[in-house]
């Protein structure tokens, strides 16, 4: 965990490549996509388990 925080600090303080704002935007988009995928898959998995549970005697 410390290593990850150190890398994030290096990225923020580094003037090469993308700026901290661009990283924040990319992170926000990744989080939105991840939440959407988890929600979609979560509902499908829940429905599958409910169907299996209802099919059992």
Image (cartoon, rainbow, N blue to C red):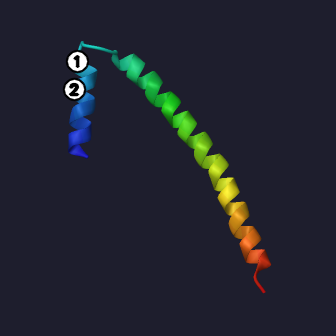
Q: Quadrant of the C terminus?
A: bottom right
Where residue 24 sits in the image (x, y, percent)?
42, 24
Number of the label disc, if any, that sits on residue 46: none
Q: Is residue 7 above or below residue 49?
A: above
Q: Is residue 27 above or below residue 4?
A: above
Q: Which residue occupies 26% across, 39% down? A: 4
Q: Which residue occupies 76% across, 69% down? A: 51
Nearer to the camera, 20 or 38? 38
SS of the residue at dot 1? loop
Left or right of 30? Residue 49 is right
Q: Is residue 56 above or below residue 43?
A: below
Task: Report crowding for label 1: few under 14, some 14 to 19, many 20 or more residues within 10 A (C-alpha).
Answer: few
Left or right of 10? Residue 57 is right
Task: Report crowding for label 2: few under 14, some 14 to 19, many 20 or more residues within 10 A (C-alpha).
Answer: few
The residue that disc 1 covers is 14
Q: Is residue 14 above or below residue 56?
A: above
How many numbered discs sit on the rendered protein?
Answer: 2
SS of the residue at dot 2? helix
Quarter where residue 33 is shown = top right
Q: Give the alpha-carbon distance from disc 1 to disc 2, as whole Å.
A: 6 Å
**Mark 1 vs 2: CB contact within 8 A:** yes
Q: Which residue occupies 34% across, 15% down? A: 19
Quarter where residue 15 is shown = top left
Quarter where residue 44 is shown = bottom right
The residue that disc 2 covers is 10
Left or right of 48? Residue 36 is left
Where residue 7 sits in the image (x, y, percent)?
23, 32
Q: Which residue occupies 64% across, 48% down? A: 39
Where residue 26 sits in the image (x, y, percent)?
45, 25
């Amino acid at each position: 965990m410390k290593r990850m925080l150190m890398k994030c600090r290096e990225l923020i303080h580094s003037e090469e490549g993308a700026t901290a704002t661009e990283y924040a935007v990319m992170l926000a988009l990744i989080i939105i996509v991840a939440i959407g995928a988890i929600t979609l898959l979560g509902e499908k998995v829940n429905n599958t388990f409910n169907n299996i549970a209802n099919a059992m005697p």
